[in-house]
């Protein structure tokens, strides 16, 4: 079971770039890395997914080193509305249904 | 709107009541899930349905009873709940049962048991 470890909380200011790192030392060959964002009293929202190297979309970038034992979610120029909990998950298609476990996530607080 | 619709958004019920939560998705996904999120706790996976068959039941008390009549609809029937069952109940769907390609969550039902 690929357990993930993230910082419990991070602080930032508007306009800054924020990098949240997730450790997944036991990641398996077939596992993908997925990041979600959750606002209070809402369901988590898919942000980005990757397998290796770098993935970028309109919201964020995901950096994955060659050993894949960690990943970094990069949020460019954050705003107050980016204040949320961010979760890192690791799992493989066709894998165990209970492998995708949401941990406590990282609470990002963006200040003006 | 995420494509996964949950009703009602808020529900207050007594411990002797019977109520049901509804979830609907028209994303063409083959798997649906119920999660529970209590205050300041991680999401807890309750049930997983894949192609309308229950494939996961994570030691959930029998006062919670899921039903999946087809691949687009999922229900959670509630009866004789306890105050500690008050939480945000989230429904999600995905392309396949492991959810590895990504979950799509609904907005949740905020349940208060009095």
Image: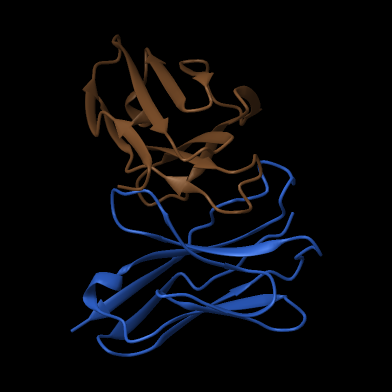
Chain colours: A blue, B brown
- Name, please, the residue furthest toward the right: A29
Can residue B88 be seen here? The reply is no
Q: Is residue B23 above or below residue B108?
A: above
Picture quadrant of residue A34: bottom right
Tell me if residue A12 comes above or below residue B28 in the rendering. below
Horizontal relation, residue A16 to residue A28: left or right: left
Q: Look at the image and tell me whether residue B69 can be seen.
A: yes
Q: Is residue B93 left or right of residue A27?
A: left
Q: Residue at x 55, y 26 (%)?
A: B60
The one of B63 and A47 positioned closer to us in this rendering: A47
Q: Position of residue A9 (x, y in %)?
A: 41, 73
**Location of the C terminus of chain A (image quadrant):** bottom left
Total labels: the figure holds 0
Please state the horizontal and vertical placement of residue B111, each as a whole percent of the image.
29, 31
Q: Nearer the viewer, residue B102 or B112?
A: B102
The residue located at (38%, 43%) in the rendering is B3
Farthest residue, direction bottom: A16
Please tell me in which quadrant of the rendered image residue A29 appears: bottom right
Q: Viewer-proximal residue, A53 or A104?
A: A53
Q: Position of residue A101 (x, y in %)?
A: 59, 51
- For the N terminus of chain A, the quadrant is bottom right
- B46 up-or-down from B77: above or below: below
Asked if B80 appears above or below B49 in the picture, the reply is: above
In this view, the residue in front, A53 or A44, is A53
Residue at the outermost left position: A112
């Amino acid at each position: 079971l690929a357990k993930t470890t993230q910082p419990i909380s991070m602080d930032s200011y508007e306009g800054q770039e924020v990098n949240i790192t997730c450790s997944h030392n036991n990641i398996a060959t077939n596992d993908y890395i997925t990041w979600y964002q959750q606002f209070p009293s809402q369901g988590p929202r898919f942000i980005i997914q990757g397998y290796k190297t770098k993935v970028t979309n309109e919201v964020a970038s995901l950096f994955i080193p060659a050993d894949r034992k960690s990943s970094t979610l990069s949020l460019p120029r954050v705003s107050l509305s980016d204040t949320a909990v961010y979760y890192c998950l690791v799992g493989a298609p066709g894998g165990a249904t209970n492998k995708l476990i949401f941990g406590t996530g990282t609470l990002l607080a963006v200040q003006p | 709107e995420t494509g996964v619709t949950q009703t009602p958004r808020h529900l207050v019920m007594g411990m002797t009541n019977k109520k049901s939560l509804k979830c609907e998705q028209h994303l063409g996904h083959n798997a649906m899930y119920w999660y529970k999120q209590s205050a300041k706790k991680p999401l807890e996976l309750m049930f997983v349905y894949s192609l309308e068959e229950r494939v996961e039941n994570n030691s959930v008390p029998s006062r919670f009873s899921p039903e999946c009549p087809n691949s687009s609809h999922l229900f959670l029937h509630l009866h004789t709940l306890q105050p500690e069952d008050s939480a945000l109940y989230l429904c999600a769907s995905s392309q396949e049962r492991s959810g590895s390609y990504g979950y799509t969550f609904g907005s949740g039902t905020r349940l208060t048991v009095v």
